[in-house]
Amino acid sequence: MSDVLLGSEQKPAILVIFGITGNLAKLKLLPALYHLVKDNRLHPQTIILGASRRPVSVDELLKTVEVCVLEEDNVCDPEALKDLQRRLRMYQIDPEQEADYDGLLAYLNSLEDETGMCMDRLYYLSVPPAVYPAVVHHLGVHGLNASCQHGNATTRLLVEKPFGHDVASAETLIAEMAEQFEEDQVFRIDHYLAKESAQNILTFRRHNPVFMDSWNGRHISQIKVLAHEQIGIAGRVNFYDQVGALRDLVQSHLLQLLTLVMLDLAKDDDDIALHQAKAIVLDSLSPVDVGSIVRGQYNGYTSEVDNPDSRTETYVRLNLTSDLLRWQGTDILIETGKSLDTKKTEIQIVFHEADETGNRLTFRIQPNEGIDLQLTAKKPGFGKTLQKVSMDFSYHGVFEDPKHPDAYERVLVDALNGDHSLFATSDEVMASWRVLQPILDYWQANDNLLTYEPGSRGPANSAE
Ligand code: BG6
């Protein structure tokens, strides 16, 4: 199977990035765009329009791209930077000021006049979630949700997580977006789904029939989704203190990863069937016992966020159960935390053990992407001692070029191509909030926050 040159599927587009001077744009989006330009994965006429409150020049932006790329890759290709410069335009706008949007529309129209082409329009909301409703409303009311002036092209809205902070707010946000944009215009980003190793989960399940008959609760005793981070909140004080680990990672990334393991595979790669299958899994989940969920905060967090009263969790460990027949007998465990001793995101599939024997299949999402199958073997010698051994497939050992596009490159290319498969639907978002709402309610009434040392395995006796 060959790698498709993705740029060839694209139509020319104007990618408007609201919040171009923010952290996400600096650390992820602009470097991703640099790599796409360098690898020839953007349509030659595609324009990137940086929208920002304060005046910033294209040169200033390019400087930050260069610094970030040099940090990661050690080299920064001047030709690619030049091409990025050719495509970049800046537009000063206060995203919350409705009066500014007619000007933006006129500017987009003028860009199309300049190129003489009908271009797709993509609005990337890389702004605080509190600003989403205003931007979406203003885009819609001022006609920026429509197609280009010269003919037929598509307009899309890309939004970052979190989509709301509980069931009620997510419902409101989804309804507000639905007033101005059709569901198929909205791309709800979950960059974990765009990680190469996460995409491999469905491929692995589909193309390794040896596991198919045992992919159920009769054979699998536990599914563990672990996301341990060594970093703390990395300066995102306001954002994180309002969000916490459950909303930041579990509601989106980790429940999404779980669906990839648990969903019923459709006969083909049909996008709609995939999203329906994911929503079915999410609808089937509930916490086993909200009172026993471990919730922790690393020592030093309150001074870091300058809020001595903060009860925001930086660690959570919870068990879920599914009421789907297929998953009767399987326990689901999710654990994530910041400032832990290791960085690892992985999914472990633990098969029921008989005597000392047992198997465990691990999808390593990051770092050292790969898949490990733990087997039971006889230890060499006269005895019958058993030993757990490992069959380990690592991307680096196997693929000639294990370097693969960053998740944000994939997110941007798929959105430009109009491919919804790696984005979350409103049904999935609502279903995952419903899984977590009883936990949020319980925490509201019960302050069960534990503490842990930074660099440790989390609150005592809890970590995997
Ligand atoms: C983001 C979260 O979505 O994902 C961060 O907001 C987290 O808190 C980050 O650190 C982790 O992403 P990655 O790709 O570095 O694992």
Image (cartoon, helix red, strand yellow):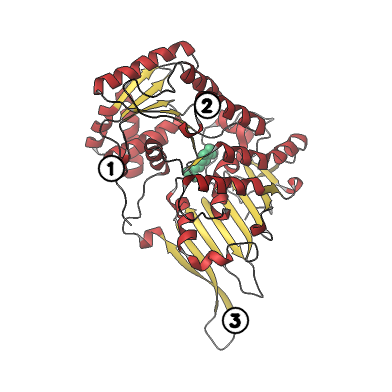
Q: Residue furthest top?
A: 99
Number of other residues with Cα within 10 Å of mark 2, as a class: few under 14, some 14 to 19, many 20 or more: some
Q: Nearer the viewer, mark 1 or mark 3?
A: 1
The residue to which callout 1 is attached is: 39
Q: Secondary structure at mark 3?
A: loop
Residue plotted at (28% across, 42% down)? 39
Which mark identifies residue 385?
Answer: 3
Q: Where does the N terminus fall, quadrant-wise?
A: bottom left
* Dot 2 or dot 1, earlier in sequence: 1
Q: Nearer the viewer, residue 315 or 39?
A: 39
Residue 416 location, x and y as percent?
Answer: 37, 36
Type of the residue with mark 2: Pro
Type of the residue with mark 1: Asp
The residue to which callout 2 is attached is: 128
Residue plotted at (69% across, 38% down)? 437
Residue 333 location, x and y as percent?
Answer: 64, 53
| Mark 2 touches mark 1? (CB < 8 Å) | no
Q: Residue furthest bottom?
A: 382
290 to 173, vertically: above or below:
below
Measure how far apart labels 2 and 3 are at the Cα level: 57 Å
Q: Where does the C terminus fall, quadrant-wise?
A: bottom right
Which mark identifies residue 69?
Answer: none
